Image (cartoon, grey):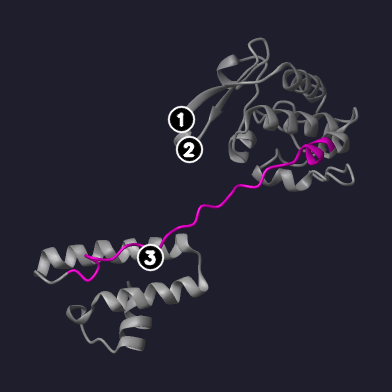
């Protein structure tokens, strides 16, 4: 609201009070935002103004300048996906028997099998001695995933993903930090992986840096 008041009302429209604001002021402000920011951002700004002017109209019996307006349209954005060739290159880049290669192969296999969010993938837990602290059930080929708000759900994986996970878990038992509850361990003494780990897997060079 302060930005709108300072940049649009005082700076452009020369309005001295909220009572003087009309629909054209709102439209001009939206046009300015759309020149610099995304439709989603402009739409969020519009809804904030809309809520304010609705409140002001109810409190002071003033006309609502947003009453006959619509928020800026938010274009649908297609989410890019890996092509078959790109997935094949990822598999080839991670092929091998080192700890990092076993881990990265399992990461890609689980990601392909489930399509879960990176934050959900990075947040998976593993404790072979306590099923209550483990999200992995290879016997049932099930993974417990915690999404937004920590709400758990079960996702199933196929034989290929289960086999890749099993190979990684066997390599994980020999890791110096196998005691950690996080499923995906780092290389050497590095911390367990975070959602940015996909940027650390080199699909071209086959090198893993984390």
Which of the two discs, 3 and 1, sits closer to the camera? Answer: 3
Q: Tell me the quarter of the picture where residue 123 sits.
A: top right
Q: Tell me the quarter of the picture where residue 94 sits.
A: top right
Q: Position of residue 48 (x, y in %)?
A: 32, 63
Per the model, the C-alpha gap separating discs 3 and 1 is 30 Å
What residue lies at 77% left-to-right and 37% top-to-bottom? 84
What is the crowding at mark 3: few (fewer than 14 residues within 10 Å), some, or many (at least 20)?
A: some
Read off the residue under disc 3. 45
- Relative horizontal placement of residue 4, taking residue 98 as reference (left or right): left
Read off the residue under disc 2. 148
Q: Which mark is residue 208?
A: none
Asked whether residue 206 is drawn in magenta, I would say no
Quadrant containing the C terminus in the rendered view: top right
- Relative horizontal placement of residue 51, taking residue 123 as reference (left or right): left
User: Are the residues flagged by discs 1 and 2 in contact, CB closer than 8 Å?
Assistant: yes
Q: Which mark is residue 151?
A: 1
Asked whether residue 66 is drawn in magenta, I would say yes
62, above or below 137, in the image: below
Q: Position of residue 143 (x, y in %)?
A: 61, 22
What residue lies at 51% left-to-right and 52% top-to-bottom? 76
Q: State the residue lying farthest toward the left.
A: 61
Mark closer to the chain start, 2 or 3: 3
74, above or below 127, in the image: below
Quadrant containing the N terminus in the rendered view: bottom left
């Amino acid at each position: 609201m302060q930005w709108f008041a300072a940049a649009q009302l005082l700076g452009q429209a020369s309005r001295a009070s909220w009572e003087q604001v009309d629909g054209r002021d709102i439209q001009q402000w939206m046009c300015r935002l759309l020149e610099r920011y995304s439709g989603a951002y402009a739409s969020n700004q519009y809804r904030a103004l809309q809520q304010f002017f609705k409140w002001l109209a109810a409190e002071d019996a003033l006309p609502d300048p947003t009453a006959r307006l619509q928020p800026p349209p938010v274009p649908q954005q297609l989410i890019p996906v890996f092509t078959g060739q790109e997935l094949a290159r990822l598999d080839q880049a991670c092929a091998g028997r080192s700890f990092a290669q076993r881990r990265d192969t399992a990461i890609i296999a689980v990601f392909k099998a489930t399509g879960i969010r990176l934050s959900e993938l990075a947040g998976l837990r593993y404790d072979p001695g306590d099923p209550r602290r483990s999200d992995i059930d290879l016997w049932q080929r099930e993974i417990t995933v915690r999404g937004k708000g920590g709400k758990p759900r079960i996702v199933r994986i196929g034989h290929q993903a289960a086999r890749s996970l099993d190979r990684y878990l066997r390599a994980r038992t020999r890791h110096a930090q196998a005691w950690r509850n996080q499923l995906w361990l780092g290389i050497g003494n590095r911390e367990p992986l975070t959602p940015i780990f996909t940027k650390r897997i080199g699909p071209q060079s086959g090198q893993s840096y984390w």
